[in-house]
Image (spheres, rainbow, N blue to C red):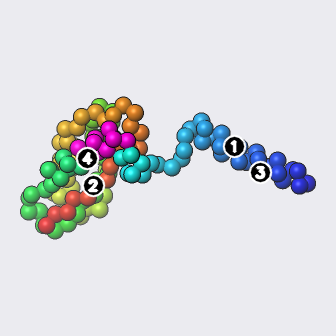
Amino acid sequence: MFRAVIVFIFICASQSAFAQFLFGPSERPTLAACMAIPENKVWIQTVTRQLRERAPKLNLGRGTVTIKFHVDFRGRVTRASLSNYDNNARALVAAGMITSLKLAPPPDDMDTDCRDFEQTFNFH
């Protein structure tokens, strides 16, 4: 019985290790892990600088808009989704800022999860 329990534990542990070997780790990389590679850090800083430069200057009332988006391997914004907004005008302005980004392609070896961003725009 004891041997059966030990064999069962090894089988369960080896399946998860084998799955991780095949599909990679299941955890998404953190921002710190993404920025650990110098080329990735420079590219991510370029994205954040462009977002700061495009900060809304319009008086659309107080509110926030949060946008999650992905940048593909060509540097184009894809899969954008809006959340946390209560005014369509603010949402359209924020979406326009995201889609107007002119980004260089990310580094070739950059993990696809490192190209997912979330930006909150605060309107005053």
Residue 113 lies, in percent from the top left, at 41, 44
Report the mark closest to the observer, 3 or 4.
4
**Amino acid bearing label 4:** Gln
**Amino acid bearing label 3:** Ile
Q: How far apart are marks 4 and 1 (CA)?
A: 39 Å
Q: In the rendered structure, are the residues bearing label 1 and label 3 in contact, judged by CB atoms less than 8 Å apart?
A: no
Q: How far apart are marks 1 and 3 (CA)?
A: 10 Å
Q: Distance between the residues labelled 2 and 1?
A: 38 Å
Residue 76 lies, in percent from the top left, at 27, 36
**Amino acid bearing label 1:** Gln
Q: Quadrant of the C terminus?
A: bottom left
**Amino acid bearing label 2:** Gln
Q: What element carries label 4?
A: helix
**Residue at image coords 28%, 33%:** 105
Which contiguous range is marked in magenta?
37-46
**Residue at image coords 66%, 45%:** 16
Mark drawn on residue 119 = 2
Q: Is mark 2 on a helix, strand or loop?
A: strand
Label whose residue precedes the other's in the sequence (2 or 1)? 1
Q: In the rendered structure, are the residues bearing label 2 and label 3 in contact, judged by CB atoms less than 8 Å apart?
A: no
Report the mark closest to the observer, 2 or 3.
3
Q: Mark 1 points at which residue?
A: 15
**Residue placed most toward the observer, 17 or 80:** 17
**Residue at image coords 26%, 58%:** 120
